[in-house]
Image: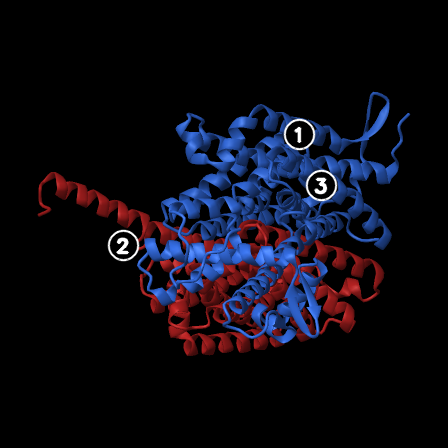
Amino acid sequence: MIDLGLAGWTIVVAAVGNVACALLGCYLVLRRLSLLGDAISHAVLPGIALAYLATGQLNGPAIVLGAMALGLVTTLLTEAVHRIGDVPEDSSMGVVFTGLFAVGVLLISQIANRVDLDPGCVLYGQIEIVPLDTVPVLGVEVPRALLTLVPVLLATVAFVLLLWKELKLAAFDPELATAMGIPAALLHYLLMAWVAGVTVASFEAVGAILVVAMLIVPAATAHLLTDRLGWMLVVAAVVAVLASVIGYRAAAYLNTSVAGMMAVAAGGLFGLAVFFAPRHGVLSRVWRTWRLALRIAGEDVLGELYRRGEAVEQKAAEEAGLTLAEARRRAGGWIGILAVWDLRRQGLVEERGGRLYPTPAGLKRGRFLVRSHRLWESLLERHSALPLDHLHDPAERIEHFIDPELQDELEALLEQAETDPHGKRIPDR
Amino acid sequence: MIAYNTLVVLAGVGLLGAAAGLVGTFATLRRRALVGDALAHAALPGLCVAFLLIGERWLPGLLLGALVSGLVGVGVIAFLRRFTRIKEDAAIGIVLSVFFGLGIVLVTWIQKTSTTGSKAGLDSYILGKTAGIVLADVQLIGLVAAAILALVLLFYKEAKLLVFDPDFARVQGWPVGWLDFLLMGLLAVVVVIGLPAVGVVLMAALLILPGSTARFWSDRFGVILTLATLFGAATGLVGASLSAATDTLPAGPIIVLVGTALFVASALFAPRRGVVARWLDDRRFRRELREGAVP
């Protein structure tokens, strides 16, 4: 028979709970309701305590349903305090969930005198013990917690798939959803109740803190890695599973809290995504900004080389080309050194006797840039009220972002103008 | 006759409530109510690291560690908001849960490995242990409260501008970033000294409740600040007294519930901004409309 061992079952229990949280978390993160998830997962505490008082059990449908009710209460109270009391939304959330949490701690501390249930075990969960409490299912000893968690996960997947279109629209454009006849408000409450239900189902196994981490962190990680909702859900689920496995291994290695370590593992994965995500990562942003700065600096040098050649042709300057120092100064600061190096690497300029000269390819690029610059100046002169001496600066900025098609359009608009407002010839491409 | 210990606890909680009320009001008005919550959670790993470095329960050292990691947490929130597509709510949630997870990892590790760890009572920082307040704590809290009061009086004008119109403050040339940082620093200090007494989760309540309650009673900044300080102190005193009188009710939750009760009462019955007052206003206005009394 299948025997996963204690470690295996622990990871399975955690992963099932974590994936359910991560799926719902995607909608919370997209709708900017992450903190409502946090608030709900704290506020269900009195629900757990009351249901425990009523049934004497810490799992089962009664507690999940009770918690779903309390999740709704939290959402409604937060809104009521916000609307009726005219309190900012974040403050009203803070007031509601701390108040409910206090009630919960109070109830539990009163019960705790009689039974073995303390606020600590609700906060951190008892995942270490969960796999020890097993029931036989089809001949396999399965942790009892899975009997709640697996149906909850399946129901969550069904919930997301069945209401796919509606949830998606409500997540990205609630007004449009309402206008199209989808009851966005109802969906909102349904989602919040569901969050509460999943929260509580996961509570016993993994504790409040891990629930909050799993609601928000995998979804946020996925949000950095993809722009499509379907993929976001998949990636979030994968991150949740990875965090469960890595977190368990690390915790076993260091002999410390499994739930805490899973939160840390999820945080670590998020940190990786923050820096290394292909499109939205910090490093790729820095890289793109840097490439752009380098391109602009390089183009400025090429433009200057073209102008210098033009000046020599018109006998306005003695010598073609630029000294290295001139070129670097033109491109500005330390980036100038890099820009000149980059231009040489691309074979756009060459050095002869301490001076830089454009290669034919470089001259072409410079001419293209100067053409953009002068076309833009002409456009501004005709169609804006800017004085003549104010035309250069905007053109200097926009020249790097004009492509051949726009040049053609500009030329057509200017009826094949020959010269720019300063009387300089607009070069052909 | 009140026992000496009870007096010490009352003084500590009262001062803490006042300080938290004062600083928390700025945070709530600046729409940073839940940053205090994140700060409180993020302080835990620093507390543990400090304990590991020092090797004993030396309060100022522990609090310094907590302060540093709390501020790192706030820094991470600001970083995520500024440089990634992660929105503020998710950033707060991430910092809160991951830092706290790290804290739990460290606490558990310390308790399992070090011999003195279990005596350090690090886990009491999570739910708080009001009865554990000693005279040295009260002195520390008093000192911090006085310092905060002095800073608020010193920067009153700047703080007011920052809270109500940060854009105008920026245009006027005030260093809004630094003022915000100062505010976060004060918030962090209060949170950190409050942790041992009321614990992580309930600290947020002490920050948010007094300011939000005071807001119902006045539209004037100075009055709100004064009231919030008084409400904070009263909440702490009444809650701690109730807890001490009954002997079985834990102080942290009781303090929060007293604050919540005060909030609800104010929301309902405050003059002018309360729900009842506004309902009466509304009714009178409707009647006047019907009778054509409005010119």
Camera-near label (3 vs 1) is 3
Q: Does residue A9 appear left or right of residue A234 in this picture?
A: right
User: Are labels 3 and 1 on one chain?
Assistant: yes
**Chain holding disc 2:** B
Q: Position of residue A12 (x, y in %)?
A: 78, 36
Mark number, residue B272: 2
Q: Is residue A223 above or below residue B176?
A: above
User: Are labels 3 and 2 on one chain?
Assistant: no
Q: Position of residue A381 (x, y in %)?
A: 35, 58
Residue at 64% x, 28% y: name it. A157
Q: Which residue is mark 3?
A: A240
Task: Say what amino acid the circle numbered 1 marks.
Answer: Val
Do the CB atoms of the residues marked 1 and 2 lie less than 8 Å apart?
no
Residue at 72% x, 60% y: name it. A345
Rate crowding at label 1 as few (under 14), some (14 to 19) or many (20 or more) other CA atoms within 10 Å. Answer: many
**Chain holding disc 1:** A
C-alpha span from label 3 to label 1? 16 Å
Chain A hue? blue
Pick whichever of labels 3 and 1 is earlier in the sequence: 1
Q: Which residue is mark 1?
A: A152
Q: Does residue A225 appear left or right of residue B289 in this picture?
A: right
Q: Is residue B96 something one can see in this rendering?
A: yes
Chain B hue? red
Camera-near label (3 vs 2) is 3
The image quarter in which residue A22 lies = top right
User: Are labels 1 and 2 on one chain?
Assistant: no
Front-most of residues A268 and A426? A426
Q: Does residue B141 appear left or right of residue B218 in this picture?
A: right
